[in-house]
Structures are given as structure tokens and as C-alpha cells.
Image (spheres, rainbow, N blue to C red):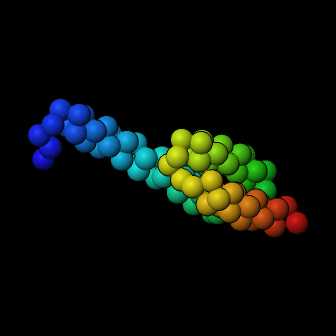
Amino acid sequence: MPNIQSAKKRLRQSRKRRVHNRDVRSSIRTLTKTLLHTDSAEEAEGVYRQVSSLLDRAARKGVLPKNAVDRRKSRLSRYVQSLSN
């Protein structure tokens, strides 16, 4: 455990961030699974917009790397397009 005040604060901040980042990643995974189990093209499009928005926000906040977000969005987009064909 840290003894210095600034180190104690840093520990509190990192714990809070870790919990928040875990929640963000969990919600992204949940929505992604919802999208992949959707049969309707219209419904999938709506869920894709939500997932895409969450992924972009996670990249902006530094929760996920930007390239990883772009890759996931690309794969999910291809899946949604395959449903409409």
C-alpha cells in the first residue's frame, strides 16, 4: 500500500477507472452478442448503431485502442450487410 498522499490518490483513481472501463467493455460485449444473435436486418442495423457509438466513445476515452475499435466496427458492419442480402 502506498504511503505518499499522491500515490494514495493515484491508487483511488486507478481503481475507479478500472471499474468504469470494465463496465464499458462489458456493455460493448453484451451489445455485440445481441447484434450477432439478431435475425432481422432492420433490428441489427439499430443495434449496430448503438454498438458503433459505444465503440467510438471507448476509443475516444482510451478504453480500447482505435485500431481495435475500427476492426470490430468493420467486422460487425460486414455482418449487418450480410443480413440484408
Q: Quadrant of residue 73?
A: bottom right
Residue drawn 17% across and 32% down? Answer: 5
Residue 2: x percent and y percent?
A: 15, 43
* Residue 68 quadrant: bottom right
Q: Is residue 80 left or right of residue 3?
A: right
Does 71 appear above or below 48? below
Where does residue 57 sit, x and y in percent of width and height?
60, 41
Q: Position of residue 8 (x, y in %)?
A: 20, 37
Using the rendered image of the protein, determine whether residue 50 is visible from the camera's viewpoint. no
* Residue at (22, 39) in percent of width and height: 7
Where does residue 80 sit, x and y in percent of width and height?
A: 77, 60
Above-or-below relation of 79 to 6: below
65 w.r.t. 12: above or below: below
Q: Is residue 78 left or right of residue 53?
A: right
* Quadrant assignment for the C terminus: bottom right
52 vs 10: above or below = below
Q: Does the rendering let one see residue 15?
A: yes
Of residue 26 and residue 70, the one placed in the foreground of this image is 70
